[in-house]
Amino acid sequence: MHSFEQSARDLTSALPEPTFEAWREVEDRLVVVGERAPVSLVRPALEALTSGGKRLRPLLLILSARLGAPDRESLLRASTAIEVLHTATLIHDDIVDRADSRRGQPTTVAAYGREIAIGTGDYLFAESFSELAGIGDPRLVRAFSEAAEGLAAGELEQYRASGATVELAAYLDHIRKKTAGLFKAACVAGGTLGGLSLRQIDALATYGNALGIAFQMSDDVMDLVGKPGLMGKGIGTDLIEGTVTLPVIFALQEGDAEKIWSVLTDPDPAPGLLEAGIEAVLATDAIEKTEAWARGEIDAAVDDLSILPDSAERAILEAIAAEVVGRDA
């Protein structure tokens, strides 16, 4: 697996012009959302919305929609809404995790304090559903609501499980809620707006879910192998926070569990202890097993895309999947 940043840029440069234009217009609409916030929240909202994310969720929604024939205004509203919702969840995650930085910049809670951060996250959460209200399709509201419920439950479960034993089934359930839910919602909403058949929308749902799972597993690996993670985190962040990821689960079964647990249960592990914990994970087959699992998720999902229209958008969906698990598209 490898950094997703450059490959994402390469993929977006290959987008058909109408798809690319819609994706870029989301950026302008995010600024509008920030500017219409209550006065005390304008600056933190704008900073959070324009902090340089990959905009992968809007891209998935637009690609899925343009497999059919979406209404352009509805498409732009939904694409903006999913990025606004994603941004709201990042702010709330950082509050719970007491995170100081994200993507190399101070988090909203670090820069403005807890009260402003909570207000900003709540405002963005409300704005995402305000955008959906402008479309007036209850199927989209249902898809977003299910994702939002999963995100809330997943964050709470992660907080409670920090530094505790995590079973494989619990880990998979957690990442389906915490990461895969928004990917799935993006694909389902897009397919719905494009007027695709229920069978085609189900294929997109399967793809989005699998892509989100593989995306998180890839990030779990990046947290340990010395490269910036897909989520914009630094090395060993998960271990420092006591978060038990898939490679750690595998390593606890195969390797020096005592050393790994000593890092997970230390609220502020010294650099030497953290390095020893990472080395203990890397001494096992945990990374290879995690990569293989992610590839399996993607292979099955891409197979399902065969029932979708043969188009540039479908080819790019397949290429995104390949890039997430570090294969040649």
Image (spheres, rainbow, N blue to C red):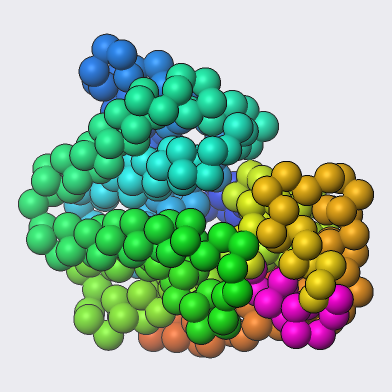
Q: Nearer the viewer, residue 251 or 308?
A: 251
By secondary structure, the bulk of the magenta-drawn segment is best described as: helix
Report whether 131 appears left or right of 79: left
- Residue at position x 67%, y 63% from top? 220
Q: Position of residue 69 (x, y in %)?
A: 25, 61
Q: Position of residue 282 (x, y in %)?
A: 87, 70
Eyeballing the image, is 75 above or below 130? below
- Residue at position x 11%, y 46% from top? 133
Judge whether residue 3 can be spotted in this image: no
Q: Residue furthest top?
A: 39
Magenta-colored stretch includes residue 246: yes
Q: Quadrant of residue 49?
A: top left
Eyeballing the image, is 168 above or below 46? below
Q: Nearer the viewer, residue 78 or 252?
A: 252
Report whether 138 appears left or right of 25: left
Magenta-colored stretch includes residue 107: no
Magenta range is 245-256
Eyeballing the image, is 188 above or below 45? below
Q: Nearer the viewer, residue 50 or 321?
A: 50
- Residue at position x 64%, y 68% from top? 245
Q: Quadrant of the C terminus?
A: bottom right
